[in-house]
Image: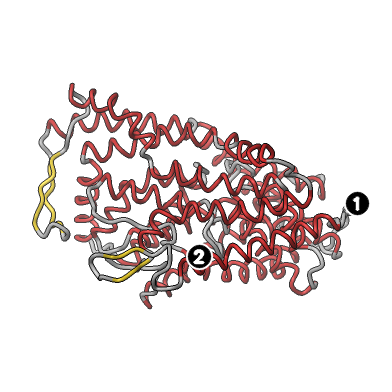
C-alpha cells in the first residue's frame, strides 16, 4: 500500500496535525456566531475612526462614498434584534435548498436514486468500468450525499466482481463523489445553494448584480468529462498499480435488480421523458409559458424563469419520476406516503436550518455595517497596485479554498464566510461573480478526499476495512492523494483554457464584467 514506512509515518503526521487543528474548531454554526460578534466589535472601531471608501458605481454612473456603520450602539442593537427573523427568512439559499430537497427526497426515499445508480454500475463492459464508476460518483451529487452511502460501496463491489482490487473501485467512486463534488451534467441542489449565497454577498455589498443557479453549468459539464478521464487515468495507472493484486477474502454479493425494480425504472424513465417534453414546450418557443418580456430588449426571454422558476422545476424533475417509481414498486400507496418521503428529506435538513440562521445574520451584518464594501474596495486597490489580478488571482483563490477545505468541510458554510469578501473584491478587479464562484468550487471539491474532517471520511475508512483489515486513515489518504493532486491541477488547467478563450461559464455568465 505504501512505498515506504517513512511515507506512511509522514502521512500519519500530516493527518494528525490536520485532525488536531480541525477538531479544535467549533461547530460551523458557532463559527458564524463568533464571526458575527467580531463584526459587531470591528464595526464599532472602524466607524469610530471614520473610515470610508469612494468608488465609481457603473450602474449609478457616479462616484459613491461609503462610510462604516457601527453595530456597537443603540441603532445597531435595534437592528440586530429587529432584523434577525427577516435575515433568516430572507436568506436566499434557505428557500432554494428546501424546495429542491422536497423532490430529491421523494426520489431518494422511494429507492429510485439507489437503484438507478446500481443499474448504471452493473453489466458494464470491463474497459469502461472505471470510467462509469467515476461518472456515477460525480452524477450522484444531484442527490446531495446519496453517493457516499450508495456509489462508494457499489464501486468496490463491482470492481471485486470484475476480479479487480475492491479498494481501487472504492477509491474511484470516492474520487467521483467527493473530489468531483461540484461537477455535474445537470443542475443539482448545490448550484442554487451557492448562487444564493453569492447573491447575498452581492446584495450586502450594494452591487446591482445577480447570478442564476445555472451560472456555472457549462463549466461544470466540461469538468465532468475532464474528471472522468482524470479519475480513470489515476485509478488504472497509479492506484491499482500501487495496490497490486488483491489477496483479501472478500467475496461480493451481487444481488440483481428485481423485475419490479426494473419496471419501476422503466416507468420513471417514461414519466421523466414526458416531463422533459412538456418543459421544453414551455421554454423553447418564442412565446413559451416560461418566457417573459424583457423591457430593456423588448424580447421574450428566460431570464426571469432562470432567476425564480428553476428551483420548483428541480423539485418536479425528481418528484415526477420518483413518484412513478414509488407507485410501481409499491413504496407509494397513497398521498400519505408521498408526504412521508418529503418529510424525511426535511428532517435531514435540521442541521442546515440551524447553520442558515447564524450564517444569515453574519452576511447581513456585513451589508449593514458596509464592512464588505470597504474591505472589497480597499482589497481590490491593494491587489491592483501590486499587479495581482487575472489568472494569478484566480489560482491563488483556488488554493486558498482548497486549503481551508482541509479544516472546514461544509461547502455552504465556507462560501458564506468567503463570498462577502472575495466576490465583490474580485468583481471590482473585473472578474465576474460567476467566475469567483466556479473557482471556489474547484478548491472546495478537490481536497475533500484527503481530510479526515470531511463528514463521511470515517465511514469510508470503515468501508475500506471491509476489504483490507489493515487499512486505516493513513491508507485511505495515501490512496486518495493522487486523485486530489491530479484533479486540482487538471481543473486549474481547464479554468486557464476557459479564461484565455473567454468562454461563458453558464447562460449569460461570462469571465469578465
**What residue is pinned by disc 2?**
220
Secondary structure at numbered mark 2: helix
Q: Residue furthest top?
A: 74
> Could you tell me which residue is drawn at 45 percent across and 42 percent down?
95
> Could you tell me which residue is drawn at 76 percent across and 55 percent down?
154
Give the vertical position of 108 relative to 240 (above or below): above
Give the vertical position of 33 relative to 233 (above or below): above
**What residue is pinned by disc 1?**
249
Q: Residue 368, how many percent across, how many down?
A: 23, 37
Of residues 225 and 310, the one nearer the viewer is: 310
Direction from residue 120 to residue 306 in the image, left or right: left
Q: Quadrant of the C terminus?
A: bottom left
Instruction: Specify whether residue 178 is in view.
Output: no
Few, some or many residues within 10 Å of mark 1 (<14, 14–19, 20+): few
Q: Quadrant of the N terminus?
A: bottom right
Direction from residue 485 to residue 416 in the image, left or right: left
Secondary structure at numbered mark 1: loop
Give the vertical position of 131 relative to 461 (above or below): below
Instruction: Specify whether residue 403 is in view.
Output: yes
Viewer-nearest of discs 1 and 2: 2
Total marks shown come to 2
Amino acid at each position: 500500500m505504501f512505498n515506504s514506512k517513512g511515507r506512511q509515518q509522514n502521512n500519519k503526521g500530516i493527518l494528525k496535525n490536520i485532525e488536531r487543528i480541525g477538531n479544535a474548531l467549533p461547530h460551523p454554526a458557532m463559527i458564524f456566531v463568533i464571526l458575527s460578534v467580531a463584526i459587531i466589535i470591528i464595526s464599532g472601531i472602524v466607524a469610530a475612526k471614520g473610515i470610508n471608501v469612494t468608488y465609481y458605481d457603473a450602474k449609478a454612473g457616479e462616484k459613491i462614498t461609503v462610510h462604516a456603520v457601527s453595530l456597537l450602539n443603540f441603532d445597531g442593537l435595534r437592528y440586530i434584534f429587529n432584523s434577525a427573523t427577516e435575515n433568516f427568512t430572507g436568506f436566499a439559499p434557505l428557500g432554494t435548498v428546501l424546495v429542491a430537497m422536497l423532490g430529491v427526497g421523494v426520489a431518494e426515499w422511494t429507492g429510485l436514486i439507489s437503484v438507478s445508480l446500481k443499474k448504471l454500475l452493473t453489466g458494464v463492459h470491463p474497459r469502461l468500468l472505471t470510467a462509469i464508476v467515476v461518472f456515477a460518483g460525480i452524477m450522484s451529487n444531484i442527490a446531495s450525499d446519496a453517493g457516499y452511502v450508495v456509489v462508494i460501496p457499489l464501486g468496490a463491489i463491482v470492481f471485486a466482481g470484475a476480479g479487480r482490487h475492491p479498494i481501487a473501485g472504492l477509491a474511484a467512486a470516492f474520487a467521483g463523489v467527493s473530489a468531483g463534488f461540484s461537477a455535474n451534467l445537470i443542475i443539482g441542489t448545490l448550484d442554487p445553494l451557492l448562487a444564493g449565497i453569492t447573491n447575498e454577498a452581492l446584495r450586502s455589498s450594494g452591487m446591482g448584480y445577480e447570478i442564476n443557479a445555472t451560472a456555472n453549468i457549462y463549466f461544470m459539464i466540461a469538468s465532468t468529462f475532464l474528471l472522468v478521464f482524470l479519475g480513470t487515468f489515476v485509478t488504472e495507472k497509479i492506484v491499482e498499480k500501487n495496490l497490486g493484486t488483491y489477496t483479501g477474502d472478500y467475496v461480493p454479493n451481487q444481488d440483481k435488480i428485481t423485475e419490479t425494480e426494473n419496471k419501476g425504472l422503466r416507468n420513471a424513465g417514461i414519466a421523466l421523458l414526458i416531463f422533459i417534453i412538456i418543459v421544453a414546450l414551455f421554454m423553447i418557443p418564442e412565446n413559451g409559458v416560461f418566457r417573459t418580456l424583457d423591457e430593456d430588449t423588448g424580447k421574450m426571454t428566460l431570464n426571469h424563469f432562470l432567476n425564480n422558476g428553476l428551483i420548483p422545476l428541480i423539485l418536479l424533475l425528481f418528484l415526477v419520476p420518483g413518484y412513478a417509481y414509488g407507485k410501481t414498486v409499491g413504496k407509494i400507496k397513497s398521498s400519505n406516503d408521498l408526504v412521508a418521503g418529503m418529510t424525511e428529506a426535511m428532517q435531514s435538513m435540521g442541521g442546515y436550518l440551524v447553520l442558515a440562521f447564524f450564517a444569515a445574520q453574519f452576511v447581513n451584518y456585513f451589508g449593514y455595517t458596509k464592512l464588505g464594501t470597504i474591505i472589497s474596495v480597499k482589497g481590490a486597490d491593494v491587489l491592483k497596485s501590486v499587479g495581482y489580478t487575472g489568472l494569478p488571482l484566480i489560482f491563488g483563490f483556488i488554493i486558498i479554498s482548497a486549503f481551508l477545505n482541509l479544516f472546514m468541510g461544509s461547502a455552504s458554510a465556507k462560501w458564506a464566510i468567503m463570498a462577502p469578501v472575495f466576490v465583490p473584491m474580485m468583481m471590482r478587479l473585473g472578474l465576474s461573480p460567476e467566475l469567483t464562484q466556479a473557482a471556489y468550487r474547484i478548491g472546495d471539491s478537490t481536497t475533500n478526499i484527503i481530510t479526515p474532517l470531511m463528514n463521511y471520511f470515517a465511514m469510508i475508512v470503515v468501508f475500506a476495512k471491509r476489504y483490507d483489515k489493515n487499512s486505516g486513515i493513513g491508507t485511505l489518504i495515501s490512496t486518495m492523494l493522487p486523485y486530489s493532486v491530479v484533479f486540482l491541477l487538471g481543473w486549474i488547467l481547464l479554468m486557464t483554457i476557459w479564461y484565455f478563450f473567454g468562454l461563458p461559464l453558464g447562460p449569460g455568465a461570462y469571465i469578465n464584467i
